[in-house]
Image: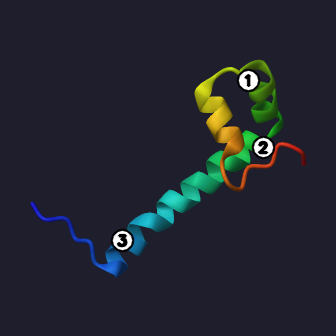
């Protein structure tokens, strides 16, 4: 099975990935996201999300 790596197809795949990333970062900035960050500062996944590009912890 060959995977189509043409620029148009790759761009088509990346669009929903970028939209999901933005949605996740938006949720992380919500009040619940801030509570999770405070309660789980030692969690690797939580720290990685807090450092992600586009994530703001001081709104």
**Residue 58: where, in percent of width, then height?**
89, 45
Where disc 3 sits, the SS reads helix
Local packing at callout 1 (Cα closer than 10 Å; few below 14, some 14-19, many 20+) is few
- Front position among marks 2 and 1: 1
Where disc 2 sits, the SS reads helix
Instruction: Find disc 3 in the rendering and name its residue.
Output: 10
Disc 2 to disc 1, how far (Cα)?
15 Å
Instruction: Find disc 2 in the rendering and name its residue.
Output: 29
Looking at marks 2 and 1 on the same chain, the residue that comes earlier in the sequence is marked by 2
- Front position among marks 3 and 1: 1
Q: Nearer the viewer, residue 40 or 26?
A: 40
Dividing the picture into quarters, in which one does residue 6 lie? bottom left
**Residue 14: where, in percent of width, then height?**
45, 65
Where disc 1 sits, the SS reads loop
Q: Residue at x 68, y 48 (%)?
A: 25
Residue 41 is labelled as 1
Above or below, 4 relative to 7: above
Looking at marks 3 and 2 on the same chain, the residue that comes earlier in the sequence is marked by 3
Local packing at callout 3 (Cα closer than 10 Å; few below 14, some 14-19, many 20+) is few
Disc 3 to disc 2, how far (Cα)?
29 Å
Disc 3 to disc 1, how far (Cα)?
35 Å
Q: Is residue 11 left or right of residue 47?
A: left
Q: Residue at x 67, y 33 (%)?
A: 47
Above or below, 30 relative to 8: above
**Residue 33: where, in percent of width, then height?**
75, 34
**Residue 16: where, in percent of width, then height?**
49, 61
Q: Is residue 8 left or right of residue 56?
A: left
Q: Residue at x 33, y 74 (%)?
A: 9
Local packing at callout 2 (Cα closer than 10 Å; few below 14, some 14-19, many 20+) is some
Residue placed furthest toward the right:
59
Quadrant where the image shows the N terminus: bottom left
């Amino acid at each position: 099975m060959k995977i189509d790596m043409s620029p148009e197809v790759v761009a088509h795949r990346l669009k929903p990935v970028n939209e999901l990333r933005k949605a996740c970062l938006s949720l992380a900035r919500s009040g619940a996201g801030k509570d999770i960050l405070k309660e789980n500062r030692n969690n690797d996944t939580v720290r990685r999300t807090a450092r992600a590009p586009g994530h703001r912890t001081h709104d």
